Amino acid sequence: SAVISQKPSRDICQRGTSLTIQCQVDSQVTMMFWYRQQPGQSLTLIATANQGSEATYESGFVIDKFPISRPNLTFSTLTVSNMSPEDSSIYLCSVEDRVNTEAFFGQGTRLTVV
Amino acid sequence: AQSVAQPEDQVNVAEGNPLTVKCTYSVSGNPYLFWYVQYPNRGLQFLLKYITGDNLVKGSYGFEAEFNKSQTSFHLKKPSALVSDSALYFCEGQAGTALIFGKGTTLSVSS
């Protein structure tokens, strides 16, 4: 199994600023996923982050807005850049354990942009 | 504490047979409930959701789920399973700003 520590758990930010969300995993994992979810909406995949390569972004998400770092197999960050109120959401990281066919989730970051 | 339970780690069905993946919830208020599927090396893919209204919800790939308030369940079903349905399935509950995931159920469909 894997335990993910996601920080911060919540934040209120001014528009135009940036926030970096961190996910630390207690074991080495190949693939990490970043999502966001708004109330009443399903999770939306932002990007897939593999160690040592550029993140792969889903349609509608771009690196300039959501830069991702993946410096090693246990850590990743997602930055929400130049924030607007529309970025208010819950952001979530997840990892996949292909060996045991499991997935694990961070606690989520509740972002409010004012 | 709020929770979402998927009581089965694995479900095995033969192709063409109906399938059920179980989910029960203990979430305050009126929860939003979701089902997702995850294939290897892919992120979660949304299947369906219950917000309000009809208890029977139809979603992608022929899946449906029935919201049962008295049993606090939201089981995922499909009338006729395909081998390509073999994957990992997650149930999620959303209550306010809390996201609560089940631990996942591996569905294996044999030909």
Image: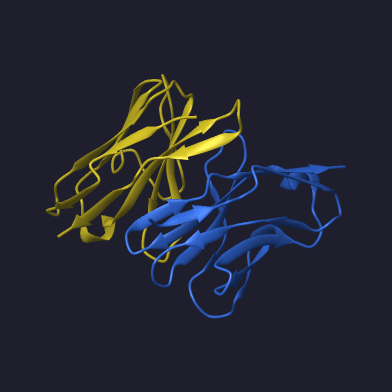
Q: Is residue A12 above or below residue B72?
A: above
Task: Tell me the residue at 34%/44% (across/down).
Answer: A107
Q: Say whether residue B25 is left or right of residue A35.
A: right
How far across and how far down the image is residue B22, in percent? 64, 56
Q: What letter labels the chain drawn in yellow?
A: A
Seen from the viewer's position, the closer of residues A101 and B29 is B29
Of all residues, the one furthest to the bottom in this rendering is: B53
- Residue A111: x percent and y percent? 24, 52
Tell me: residue B62, above or below residue A25. Answer: below
Q: Residue furthest left?
A: A14
Q: What residue is shown at x 64% (from left), y 62% (from top)?
A: B75
What residue do we see at 58% from left, 28% from top?
Answer: A98
Please state the horizontal and vertical placement of residue B71, each as a whole percent of the image.
58, 69
Q: Quadrant of the C terminus of chain A?
A: bottom left
Task: Look at the picture and state if A28 lies above or below B46.
Answer: above
Count of numbered circles in the view? 0
Viewer-proximal residue among B73 and A12: B73
Indicate the chain coloured blue by its letter: B
Seen at 62% across and 40% down, the residue is B39
Which of B70/A22 is in front?
Answer: B70
User: Residue B7 appears at what percent x and percent y?
Assistant: 61, 50
* Colour scheme shown: by chain
Quick check: B83 left or right of B35? right
